[in-house]
Structure formats: C-alpha cells, structure tokens
Amino acid sequence: MRAVVHPPVSPGSASVALEPLQILDLPTPELKPGEVLIKVAYAGVNRPDLIQRKGAYPPPPDASPLMGLEVSGTIAALGPMWIAGKLARLSAR
C-alpha cells in the first residue's frame, strides 16, 4: 500500500514541521477482528495530523501511526468476524 508518512520526530523538535512528507510503499496491514481495509480515494489533513507531525500528539495505543484521520474510499477487505449483513446496516447509516 502507498502511504504519506512524516520523518520520525523527537519530542520538542522545532524543525520537524519543515521536513518534507514522503510517499512510501508499505506492507498492507493485517486486519484485526472487526476492522476493514479502505482503499483511500481522498484523505483530509486536520489539526491533530499537524500536531502529530510535530510529535506532540501521539496516536492512541493500537492505532495506526499514519497521518490522515479522515478518509473517503471503498472497502477493500474485511477483517475476521465481519458479517455481510452487519456491514450493510453500518453503511446505510
């Protein structure tokens, strides 16, 4: 999968905001129970992403470290324990 990533950050570093973002090919993550893999068409960059890039907003435990908390796209794969009917009900909301 392709992802936009920022260089590793040392907390308190002032110059990190000027470091260029990189587009890298990364391994496709293994899905955990109840997760979905999204083929992202569009991703927004919001304030938490910018603060995370500066090293002042670590992702929650067990969350992806990649930027782009808000995305739009299509579901590419379902993790274990998904039921097709349940997915249909969620997408109708």
Image (tube, helix red, strand yellow):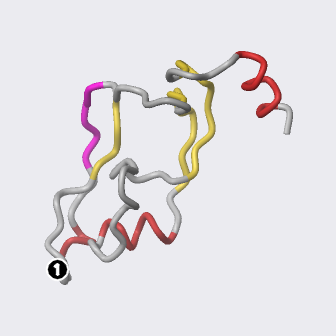
Label 1 sits on residue: 13
In-image side of 22 versus 51 (left or right): left
Image quadrant assignment for residue 32? top left
Is residue 2 or residue 34 the one in the foreground?
A: 34
Query: Where in the figure is residue 78, as x and y percent of width and height?
Result: 55, 21
The span picked out in magenta is: 22-27
Residue at 34% of width from left, 31% of height from top?
A: 2
Residue at 50% of width from left, 58% of height from top?
A: 45
Question: Is 5 one of the magenta-colored residues?
Answer: no
Query: Where in the figure is residue 37, as x and y percent of width and height?
Result: 50, 28
Query: Where in the figure is residue 46, as x and y percent of width and height?
Result: 53, 65
Quadrant showing the C terminus: top right
Q: Main secondary structure of the magenta part?
A: strand
In the displayed structure, 47 sits above or below 30; it is: below
Query: Where in the figure is residue 92, as x and y percent of width and height?
Result: 85, 32
Is residue 3 or residue 21 the one in the foreground?
A: 3
Residue at 40% of width from left, 61% of height from top?
A: 60
In-image side of 49 versus 12 (left or right): right
Residue at 57% of width from left, 40% of height from top?
A: 42
